């Protein structure tokens, strides 16, 4: 008899592991019982918990529901009685398939974006508004830069009919094990909320946790792209870049060379430089690579990625070396994890000894002898070119960065330009970051200007959205323009791209530098040319606002 063990309640990964080991040991004592890892092979499914889960894969199987206490205290008795006590699986009435939307009453959701700022909270607001409009109970947990907000409790998980995950990065989801789950991006959840919920009701599958599937496989069976792995790295690197950049900028306020003299202001400029440049910036590439590897290979990949990233950083391979280190570390550890098979008694050695040791050895040697030398040369050449480029090349690069920042308002193209600009900070090239932030502020400010110039072309709601958009733009939240994009995508994007390219070109041509990758108006005092920088942003926003005010048709309803 072949048994498959699963849980219907959220009991935690440690307890789930103990249960599996208890039943594995009990099965080994029995002659005709074996514990299998594949549900399809099982004759009987043993479910530990308080209720049967809603899982279409259980249809046609015999199941036995047992309490957690019984499972821990009498596993041999349960295995002995399993064949006679197991019954045919019938889906619980309260968790019927989502063919009937009316049966869905409780929704829990999780949102997370790479920067943990705009998309995280705007998509949460869209999900909450839509669910309440349908008459459902809803709670949305946000995973932003300050950690989890509005956390979903175990009781709310137990009562949930659907878990709706809108995340562009990896987030822990273990507490939702055994629940129907649908996964999408924050962008789709924000712009196409109704469509995504319709898909969720049709495509949601019971989440069985990372232990039952490859760590980097989506619930719908599709592999996650490299973009998502990189964005996980960017998300964890950003706080270091922000803190380090601002501390370095504050140090420069005492004088560009002040940090070299320990007698200046009791050594404060040097201390600030040591914290910002010597510590925060020294860690940023390692942290980036570590969390790229973590996204690919889960926790065993983190240490190996950190080591590979630190080797890239010390060798001068910069952000390119960090990208390579993170990806190589992730897939090396993932491959080792799949290839190395150990007896149950030695399984615990894998994540804490074998994988870190072999992974660090393989990736470390590869970085030192194979990857770092050519990548360092490429980064040095790129850095020197950026530092020595003439005005014409600077304008071209600024135009390109500015246009990319405004094409999809926080989407993949925007994030590619942003990641490049942030990455160049590690190589002490600060002009791309200034251009990227200037351009990113343009669309929302430009939309606000358009509502002021052509007031009669906008409805009252749109004019109110323009006021909010202006504030968000000052904070470098490009997504403030998304309500306008949703209503009139082609015209808004065209006018935003032209304005963003203008701001980026002016910033790069003026050789303006910025060491903080976020903050908008609040970090402008730390740019090298604050007045000219404000002029670049204003010029780009005016271009966007005027173009859109001219090409937008008049609103038909008030």
Image (cartoon, rainbow, N blue to C red):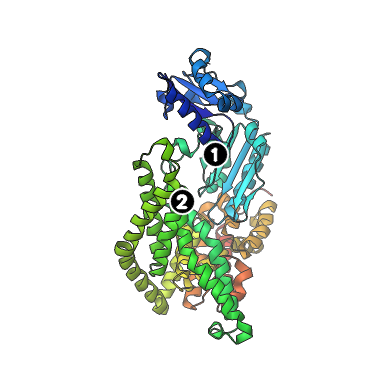
Q: Residue at x 42, y 79 (%)?
A: 391
Nearer the observer, 383 or 193: 383
The x, y position of residue 458, in whole percent, is: 65, 55
The x, y position of residue 480, in whole percent, is: 60, 57
Whether 252 is drawn above or below 446: the answer is: below
In this view of the protein, can residue 426 be seen by the observer?
Answer: yes
Nearer the observer, 445 or 132: 132
Q: Residue at x 55, y 71 (%)?
A: 276
Q: Secondary structure at mark 1?
A: helix
Q: Quadrant of the N terminus?
A: top left
**Mark 1 or 2 closer to N-term?**
1
Nearer the observer, 10 or 318: 10
**Rounded to the nearest whole Å, what is the CA distance between mark 1 and mark 2?**
19 Å
Residue corresponding to mark 1: 14
Nearer the observer, 445 or 165: 165
The x, y position of residue 557, in whole percent, is: 66, 48
Residue corresponding to mark 2: 294
Mark nearest the camera among 1 and 2 is 1
The x, y position of residue 197, in whole percent, is: 56, 37
Q: Residue at x 59, y 80 (%)?
A: 269
The residue carrying pointer 2 sits among few (fewer than 14), some (14 to 19) or many (20 or more) residues within 10 Å by Cα, namely many
Whether 86 is drawn above or below 369: the answer is: above
Q: Residue at x 64, y 47 (%)?
A: 125
Outermost residue to the top: 84
For residue 138, what is the image quadrant?
A: top right
Q: Secondary structure at mark 2?
A: helix
């Amino acid at each position: 008899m072949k048994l498959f063990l699963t849980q219907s309640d959220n009991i935690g990964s440690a307890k789930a592991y103990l249960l599996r080991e208890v039943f594995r040991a009990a099965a080994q004592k029995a002659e005709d019982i074996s514990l299998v890892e594949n549900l399809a092979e099982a004759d009987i499914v043993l479910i530990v918990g308080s209720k049967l889960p809603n899982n279409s894969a259980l249809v046609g199987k015999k199941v036995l529901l047992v309490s957690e206490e019984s499972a821990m205290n009498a596993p041999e008795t349960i295995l002995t009685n399993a064949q006679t006590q197991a019954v045919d699986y019938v889906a619980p009435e309260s968790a019927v398939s989502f063919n009937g939307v009316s049966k869905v009453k409780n929704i829990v959701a999780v949102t997370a974006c790479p920067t943990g700022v705009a998309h995280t909270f705007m998509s949460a607001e869209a999900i909450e508004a839509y669910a309440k409009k349908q008459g459902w109970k809803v709670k949305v947990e946000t995973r932003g830069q300050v950690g989890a907000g509005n956390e979903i409790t175990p009781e709310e998980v137990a009562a949930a009919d659907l878990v709706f995950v809108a995340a562009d990065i990896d987030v822990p989801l273990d507490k939702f094990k055994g629940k129907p789950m649908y996964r999408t991006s924050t962008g789709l959840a924000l712009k196409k909320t109704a469509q995504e919920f319709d898909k969720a009701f049709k495509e949601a599958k019971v989440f069985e946790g990372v232990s039952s599937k490859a760590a980097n496989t989506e619930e719908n069976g599709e592999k996650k792209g490299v973009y998502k792995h990189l964005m996980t790295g960017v998300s964890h690197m950003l706080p270091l870049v922000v803190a380090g950049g601002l501390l370095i900028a504050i140090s420069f306020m005492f004088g560009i060379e002040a940090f070299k003299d320990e007698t200046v202001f009791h050594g404060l400029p040097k201390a600030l430089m040591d914290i910002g440049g010597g510590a925060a910036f020294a860690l940023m590439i390692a942290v980036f690579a570590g969390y790229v590897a973590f996204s690919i290979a889960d926790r065993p990949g983190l240490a190996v990625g950190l080591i590979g990233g630190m080797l890239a950083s010390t060798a001068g391979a910069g952000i390119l070396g960090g990208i390579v280190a993170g990806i190589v570390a992730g897939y090396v550890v993932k491959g080792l994890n799949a290839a190395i098979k150990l007896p149950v008694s030695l399984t615990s050695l894998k994540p804490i000894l074998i994988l870190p040791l072999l992974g660090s050895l393989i990736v470390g040697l590869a970085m030192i002898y194979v990857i770092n030398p050519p990548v360092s040369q490429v980064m040095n050449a790129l850095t020197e070119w950026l530092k020595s480029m003439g005005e014409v090349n600077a304008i071209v690069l600024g135009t390109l960065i500015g246009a990319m920042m405004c094409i999809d308002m926080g989407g993949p193209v925007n994030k590619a330009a942003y990641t490049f600009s942030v990455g160049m900070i590690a190589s002490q090239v600060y002009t791309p970051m200034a251009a990227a932030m200037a351009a990113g502020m343009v669309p929302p400010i430009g939309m606000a200007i358009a509502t002021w110039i052509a007031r009669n072309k906008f409805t009252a709601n749109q004019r109110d959205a323009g006021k909010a958009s202006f504030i968000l733009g000052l904070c470098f939240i490009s997504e403030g323009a998304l309500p306008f994009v949703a209503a009139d995508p082609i015209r808004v994007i065209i006018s935003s791209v032209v304005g963003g390219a203008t701001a980026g070109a002016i910033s790069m041509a003026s050789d303006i530098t910025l060491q903080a990758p976020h903050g908008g108006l609040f970090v402008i005092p730390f740019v090298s040319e604050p007045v000219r920088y404000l002029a670049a942003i204003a010029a780009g926003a005016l271009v966007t606002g005027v173009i859109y005010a001219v090409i937008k048709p008049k609103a038909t309803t008030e």
